[in-house]
Each structure stands twice: as C-alpha cells, then as structure tokens.
Image (cartoon, rainbow, N blue to C red):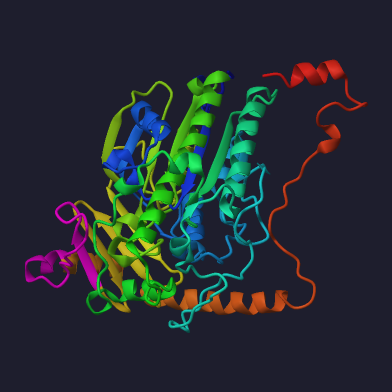
Amino acid sequence: MTNHSWGQTPSVMRPNILLIMADQLSAPFLSLHGGPAITPNIDRLIAEGTAFTSAYSNSPLCAPARFAMMSGQLNSKIGAYDNASEFTSSVPTFAHHLRSAGYQTSLVGKMHFVGADQLHGYEERLTTDIYPADFGWTPNWGDPGGRFDWWFHNMDSVVDAGIADASNQLDYDDDVAHHSIRKLRDLARTTDERPWMMTASFTHPHDPYVARQQFWDMYDHDSIPMPSVEPIADADNDPHSRRLRRVVAADTTEITDEQIRNARHAYLANISYVDHHIGEMLDTLDRHDMADDTVVIFTGDHGDMLGERGLWYKMSFFEHSARIPMIVRQPGVAGGVRNDEHVGLLDVAPTLLDLAGIEVPATMDGRSILDGGVDKTVVGEYLGEGAVAPIFMIRRGDWKYVWSSADPPQLFNVTADPSELTNLAGVPEQAEVAAAFEAEAAGRWDAEAIDAAVRSSQEARATVDRALRQGRFEAWDYVPQSDAKNQYMRSHLDLNDVESGRRA
C-alpha cells in the first residue's frame, strides 16, 4: 500500500480511484430499489459506501452519456450528440485533469470514443472498444421515418433471447474482466509512486439478451417479473415513444410473453455476470492491500426500458431508461448510507477531481456529489436517433419535466407517480409548475440553435463517412499494444529480477 499526498498537503492521502461501469443497467432492477437482480458484490458496495438512489443519465445513449460523464459538460456544449459524434481532443476530461495532477490513468473496456483520439487523457488503454470509432452510425433527423437497418436496434435481441455460452458481448467482457484484474495486480506490484485512476467498463447487461447458463440458473424462470406497465397503444402514446417503437421495429414485430420473459431473465443474469466480475476486482483490492487507499465508484451510462410501456432499450427520459446506479465507497467513510439527492453522470468528473484535491473548472456543468446542500437538479439532453428535435429534461424535487419543440411537454410527479402514467403538463392544477419549468428550459437552452447545430453536424459527418468508405478504408478503432519482447522470461533480462519483480 502506497501513501500518496493529496494536493499540496503531504500529510493527507490522495486516493487511488477505481471507476467501474456497466452498460445499460437500469437502476430499478437493483436490490437497492427493490429489484430482483442478484448482486452480492454491488450489495457489498452499497453496505460499505454511499448509494445515490436518484442518479440519472444526462443523455440516455451510450456515447453521449460517456462524453458528458468524462467532460462534466452538457453534450450540446461540446458537440457530442449521438453514437457517432466526434469527442474532440480539445475537450478536457477527468483523465486529463487527473493525469496533469500526477495520476497514472488507464482504461479497460468500453468508452465508445468516436474519432481518431481513442485515449482522451488516459495514459494507456488495455482493450479495444466494442463499438466503432468512426461516423458510420450517424443518425439523420432529415429523414425521421427512415431506419438504418444495419446498425439500428431491432427486436432480434428479444426474439432470440436465451442462453449462450459465447457471444460478441461475452467475448468482449471476458477480455475486460481479464485485463482489469491483470492491471490491478500490476498496480499492486508497480514501482511507480504515483496514485492511480483506472476505469473498468463492461458492455453488459446491454443487449443482446443472452446469458451464460451459470448466471441464468441463478434465477427461477417462472418468477422473472414481467413489465409493470403494459404496452401503450400508439394512438394513446406520446410522439417520442411512437418514434422509438418505430426506430427499434417494435411497431412491426410480434413479441410473445415468453420472449419478453426470456429477455428479462437474460438481462438479470447478465447483471449478475457483471456483479461477479465486480467481486473479483474488490477481492483483488483486498488481497493486495489496496482497498484502504482506493475509492471505488460504480455507475452506468443509462438504463433499459426492457418492455416497460412496450418500449425497449434506451433513448428516452422515462425512469427505466434514464435511471442509473451510482455508488461511492471511500476508505475511512462510514458505509450503508442512502443519499436521495438527484445526481447525474455530469457529476462524476467534478467528484473525481474533488477526491484528488483538484479545483473543479467553472466550465463543468456538474458538481461533486461529495458536497451536500447544493442545487439538487439534474438536467438532460437527448439528441440522437429517434428524436426529430432536441429533447430536454429537468429533474428537481418530485418533478420531471421533458420538453421538445416537436412534441407536447411532459410533466410527471415521480414521487406520486413512479410509473409516469399521468402527464400533468396540461392539468390546470399544475399549470403554474409547468409554466415555470417551460420558462426554465427556454432560459437554459437555445433549442433552435442546438437543433441547427445537430443537423449541421449530422450532414457533415455523413459526408465525411461516405468519402472515407471509398477506396482504402483506414479505421480509427483502437488497437491495443503489447510489449511482448519485454514480457515474461527473455535472454536480455535477469531471470531473478523477472521472477521477483512480477510477484505480488
């Protein structure tokens, strides 16, 4: 265990930081919220740390959620709108700030960086990404009825849900788990005196909904809970939900109850799969005496509707899509704490800087979740496929307000109506509340300017993508490097040094 000075005060420790991420993990499925997921290791983190019970994705789609998290800035400010938006190298991330302050930084797993820069402040990256780094997945708001069949979600994940010993996603996360444990062991035996920050980012329980037998068997199939909110007829649905059903082809695909149960069963099994690997990392910290100077944070990028309201996947601000886990375990800080303040992914970067004793830049839109008594408001933006204009969300107190120029506004009292079944935006008794939120949204965002910027970006990226697919294709995807010439036993290395130096 290495002592690291915190900021300018040598007598105080600068902690190591382990950030663990799951992909598409909807918080309502966790035991913290009374959900059915079997997660002894996440439960251990809850018992030993602080669980933020009202945490939200600021942009419920993979890449923009992560870009907001890493930069601490709203997506509309940094031009990172969707799963094919470039995360530009000039945008500082928490990895840049920590590295500048003397941290060694490493990334294992998914971060969905788009563009030629595949590091964004991380000193090393130990795996490639699971998703493409180019502009191929650019949506087109100019064709709201169109579908990009080769990359849009469809309902095959639900229709074909079940058991599999191997899949594209499982292959990837097996690799993430291996390299995460290997890196933690390397950190335990390193001679580098710098504190470290490591991100371990899994792609599960993201669809496809297939799980290994051992995790599937943790659950009784007949007891898998079905959606609590039945599918809503298109005629009665809000316009964005109708669009999302079309985007994922749910409006043209017949789904049986057994297929829904299979999908939810596999989803829960894959939460347990991620939990298993979290346990391996926590045990590694314990075995190598690193737990006492390592902060562990567990979160996710967004949730999954998983059949609620007849919707699947993410891309909306309904609770199952936007609600995420957020747990912080700090050495020397009492655990078992529930914090009901509204927090979001925008708060991760300020929190990491706060932990490291680094001043939080005024450009960041989030705040450190270690601070209490601050404005308990979370704002969100959705600017990806399925939208036809920017969608904005404000979450404060009991209320959630969603506004878009293309759709009628939505106002929900989430405390009284957790399933968000009653839109109060047009109810006379709540006219004053709705008007105040509408005015606030107009003051926070220039919807017309953001709309124009998104459409311009989509057109530009589509042009670049078409050009780069002609002739010789040069991928931006990250290729991990391995120094095999200096690994293991080599004639130019002293065997005694190799053996002793690699023991931990």
Is 209 or 303 nearer to us in this picture?
209
Q: Quadrant of the N terminus?
A: top right
Q: How far across and down, in percent of the image, does residue 66 sit?
A: 50, 53
Give the answer, above or below, for where 23 lies relative to 422: above
- Taking the spot 64% from the left edge, 27% from the top edge, the residue there is 185
Q: How far across and down, in percent of the image, does residue 375 sit?
A: 27, 48
Is 97 or 21 nearer to us in this picture?
21
Q: Is residue 389 magenta?
A: no
Image quadrant assignment for residue 118: bottom right
Is there any visible trace of residue 149 in the rendered image?
yes
Magenta stretch: give its range: 409-433
Q: Quadrant of the C terminus?
A: top right
From the viewer's perspective, tell me whether residue 277 is left or right of residue 229.
right
From the viewer's perspective, tell me whether residue 213 is left or right of residue 437.
right
- Taking the spot 48% from the left edge, 82% from the top edge, the residue there is 146
Give the answer, above or below, for where 469 lies relative to 25: below
Give the answer, above or below, for where 359 lies relative to 247: above
Q: Is residue 426 magenta?
A: yes
Image quadrant assignment for residue 502: top right
Is 201 or 58 nearer to us in this picture?
201
Q: Residue furthest right?
A: 491
Is there any visible trace of residue 9 in the rendered image?
no
- Taking the spot 14% from the left edge, 73% from the top edge, the residue there is 426
From the viewer's perspective, tell me whether residue 85 is left or right of residue 329.
right
